[in-house]
């Protein structure tokens, strides 16, 4: 049975919902799953004024816990076409893990959100995937066997590089059924691969 970590940063709750769907999919594959979030860097007063979602129940992740997992699936909102500074800060602390190859051969994945359809979903995913590769991990995306990402009858996120959602510039749009299904599919797919590799 694979052990999977869903590691995320969510300002307004969109990625939190996607993380829960990713975790559900991994559990459907029989994996043991933990959901953890990275620390908030914005001062609390500023975050409250900006209506950040500060009541997220997921425990805060610790860098030293990452080697305990067979697969790590990372999600974050987009900042100018790249991952959020909160997630980047957390990953920047993995140097000691990189130096000793602690994550070599583990399975990884990425999911993201943007304000608009063309707001940098794929570049954000690649900014995560680049970290996974440098850490020696095996990145796994969202294959086209998830047919929801090919639909043209609705506005939807989803790329072959990972599940995505569109939040709208004011955060008013919540993840759609198709987007959550893509997140579940990716979580299950990664957990199944991790189980094949690690039993």
Image: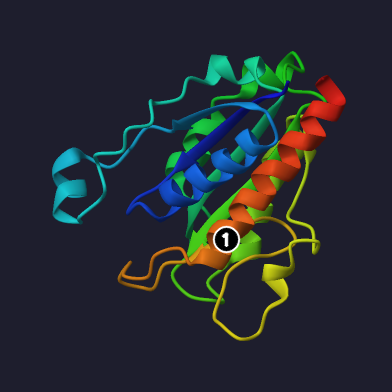
Q: How many marks?
A: 1
SS type, badge 1: strand
**Rendered position, 102 above or below 189:** above
Determine which quarter of the picture holds residue 173: bottom left
Quarter of the figure with the N terminus: top right
Identify the residue at image location x=55%, y=14%: 64
93 and 153: which one is in front?
Answer: 153
Residue 86 in the image, given as x and y percentages of width and height: 43, 41
- Could you say where residue 98 lies in the image, as x and y percent from the top left? 71, 22
Left or right of 17? Residue 127 is right
Q: Foreground residue, 148 or 123?
A: 148
Quadrant of the drawing holding the C terminus: top right
Taking the view exactly as shown, the residue that stands out farthest to the right is 197
**Residue shown at 43% from the left, 50% from the top:** 17
- Image: 64 above or below 126: above
User: Quick check: 89 above or below 83?
Assistant: above
Residue 57 pos. (x, y %): 32, 33
Residue found 48% across the figure and 67% down from its top? 176
Residue beneath disc 1 = 164
């Amino acid at each position: 049975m694979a052990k999977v970590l869903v590691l995320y940063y969510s300002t307004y709750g969109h990625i939190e919902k996607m993380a829960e769907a990713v975790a559900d999919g991994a559990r459907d594959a029989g994996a043991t799953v933990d959901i953890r979030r990275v620390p908030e860097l914005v001062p609390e007063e500023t975050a409250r004024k900006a209506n950040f979602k500060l009541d997220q129940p997921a425990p805060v992740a610790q860098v030293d816990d990452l080697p305990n997992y067979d697969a790590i699936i990372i999600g974050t909102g987009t900042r100018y076409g790249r991952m959020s500074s909160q997630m980047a800060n957390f990953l920047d602390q993995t140097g000691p893990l990189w130096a000793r190859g602690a994550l070599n051969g583990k399975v990884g994945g990425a999911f993201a959100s943007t304000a608009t359809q063309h707001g940098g979903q794929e570049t954000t995913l690649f900014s995560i995937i680049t970290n996974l590769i440098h850490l020696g991990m095996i990145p796994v995306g969202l294959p086209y066997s998830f047919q929801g990402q090919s639909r043209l009858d609705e506005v939807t996120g989803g790329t072959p590089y990972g599940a995505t959602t569109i939040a709208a510039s004011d955060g008013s749009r919540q993840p759609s059924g198709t987007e959550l299904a893509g997140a579940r599919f990716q979580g299950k797919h990664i957990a199944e691969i991790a189980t094949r590799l690690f039993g």
